[in-house]
Image (tube, helix red, strand yellow):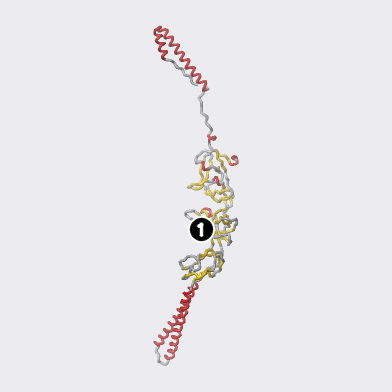
């Protein structure tokens, strides 16, 4: 409450003028009383102000810092023995896929003898190419052998007669040498004709497209009446022995923990069937874009394993001792994976980590944590590094 004291100065001036008229003593006495009244009023206003304020300066209430800091749930994960398990996905494929195409001259396809899904043996005819022209060429080569053989027989007979006459002196030794060379050339022409016939027969045999090994026919890309040549590409593909594999894509860090011979469980997409596989090869290179490598896992034949399909795999890896956190505690950005921990001053600190295997129990932290840190479990995305918080242990929060 404020008290205001107003003094009408115009009235005071009139009183002064009257005092001057009445006399100096009377005027002095009135001014003295007036100042006493003003002093009393001012003192009263000051006393009233002090009473209302309680006599002390009012200080605004300051809440304790711990009450204003946001509460976050934290957990010290500890470190336990974790049986290594790597989960990945990949593509099913034939372990050894054999592409089959035209080996010989090619031509018009007369017949196709197999369908995808058929089992074939080594050397079995898959398709036949028309050989009407090549058959005539084979006959001509056979006739050339007979011609060459007749010339060789004649040259041999001439040489034999000359040898009988040379003893009587009718034929010189030079004639004998000439007839011998003629005989040898004729014999050589017979051998050439026979070789040409064998070559022709081999080329004709290549007109049959045959399976290079026993296995399962995967694809067929040719039809009767089609004209094919060595440039026609793959006409059939065969999985040798029907063996399959999974090309599992695994991160470069996890790939190091997978050993050749490791056992895995494969589940094709869209089915509940599971198959046991064995890692028989690891890729020696890492993809520069995805930072992943390939683990090739051998599988036996089963109709549910279709090359080109997707499947998931769980591989056993080395046993490690490491902390394990729920997915909500792990964050990531362009700098990699990290967690927020709360230090001794209740300040949020960013801690970079490397993520290991993932399971229903949580995510294994391969490196970056000892296990005794207070890790923020939830709402880490709303915190900033250096922020002061009020940590609440997971058990107390619940």
Mark 1, other Cα within 10 Å: few <14 / some 14–19 / many ≥20? some
Is 253 situated above or below 24?
below
Horizontal placement of 10 versus 112: left or right?
A: left
SS for dot 1:
loop
Outermost residue toward the front in this view: 225
- The quadrant in which the C terminus is found is top right
Q: Nearer the viewer, residue 347 or 38?
A: 38
Q: Nearer the viewer, residue 80 or 252?
A: 252
Question: Is residue 360 at all visible to an observer of this figure?
Answer: yes
Q: Position of residue 273 (x, y in %)?
A: 60, 57
Q: Position of residue 120 (x, y in %)?
A: 56, 67
- Which quadrant of the structure image shows residue 71? top right
Q: Residue at x 52, y 31 (%)?
A: 62
Count every numbered label the image shows and give the total.
Answer: 1
Q: Position of residue 96 (x, y in %)?
A: 53, 63
Outermost residue toward the bottom in this view: 168
Is 302 situated above or below 17?
below
On the image, numbered disc 1 is attached to which residue? 283
Question: Is residue 345 at all visible to an observer of this figure?
Answer: no
Horizontal placement of 168 versus 299: left or right?
A: left
Is 195 situated above or below 358?
below
Q: Residue at x 40, y 92 (%)?
A: 170
Q: Nearer the viewer, residue 229 or 91?
A: 229
Q: Nearer the viewer, residue 31 or 347?
A: 31
Is 271 situated above or below 176?
above
């Amino acid at each position: 409450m404020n008290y205001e004291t107003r003094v009408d100065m115009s009235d005071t001036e009139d009183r002064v003028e009257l005092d001057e008229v009445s006399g100096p003593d009377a005027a002095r006495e009135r001014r003295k009383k007036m100042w006493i009244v003003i002093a009393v009023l001012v003192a009263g206003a000051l006393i009233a102000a002090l009473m209302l304020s309680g006599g002390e300066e009012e200080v605004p209430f300051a809440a304790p810092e711990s009450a204003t800091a946001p509460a976050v749930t934290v957990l010290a994960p500890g470190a336990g023995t974790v049986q290594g398990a790597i989960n990945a996905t990949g593509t099913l494929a034939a372990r050894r896929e054999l592409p089959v195409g035209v080996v010989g001259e090619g031509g018009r396809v007369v017949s196709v003898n197999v369908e995808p899904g058929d089992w074939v043996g080594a050397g079995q005819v898959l398709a036949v190419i028309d050989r009407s022209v090549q058959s005539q060429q084979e006959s001509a080569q056979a006739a050339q052998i007979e011609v060459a053989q007749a010339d060789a027989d004649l040259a041999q007979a001439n040489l034999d007669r000359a040898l009988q006459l040379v003893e009587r002196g009718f034929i010189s030794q030079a004639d004998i040498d000439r007839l011998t060379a003629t005989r040898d050339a004729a014999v050589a022409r017979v051998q050439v004709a026979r070789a040409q016939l064998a070559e022709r027969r081999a080329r004709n045999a290549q007109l049959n497209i045959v399976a290079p090994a026993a296995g399962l026919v995967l694809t067929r890309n040719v039809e009767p009446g089609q004209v094919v040549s060595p440039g026609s590409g793959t006409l059939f593909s065969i999985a040798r022995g029907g063996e399959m594999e999974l090309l599992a894509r695994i991160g470069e860090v996890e790939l190091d923990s997978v050993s050749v011979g490791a056992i895995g469980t494969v589940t094709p997409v869209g089915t509940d069937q599971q198959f046991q596989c064995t890692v028989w090869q690891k890729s020696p290179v890492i993809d520069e874009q995805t930072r992943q490598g390939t683990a090739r896992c051998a599988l036996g034949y089963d109709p549910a394993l279709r090359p080109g399909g997707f499947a998931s795999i769980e591989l056993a890896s080395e046993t490690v001792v490491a902390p394990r956190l729920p997915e909500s505690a792990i964050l990531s950005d362009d700098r990699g994976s990290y967690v927020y921990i709360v230090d001794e001053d209740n300040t949020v600190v960013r801690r970079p980590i490397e993520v290991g295997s993932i399971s229903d129990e949580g995510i294994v932290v391969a490196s970056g944590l000892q296990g005794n840190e207070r890790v923020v479990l939830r709402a880490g995305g709303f915190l900033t590094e250096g922020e002061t918080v009020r940590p609440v242990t997971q058990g107390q929060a619940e």
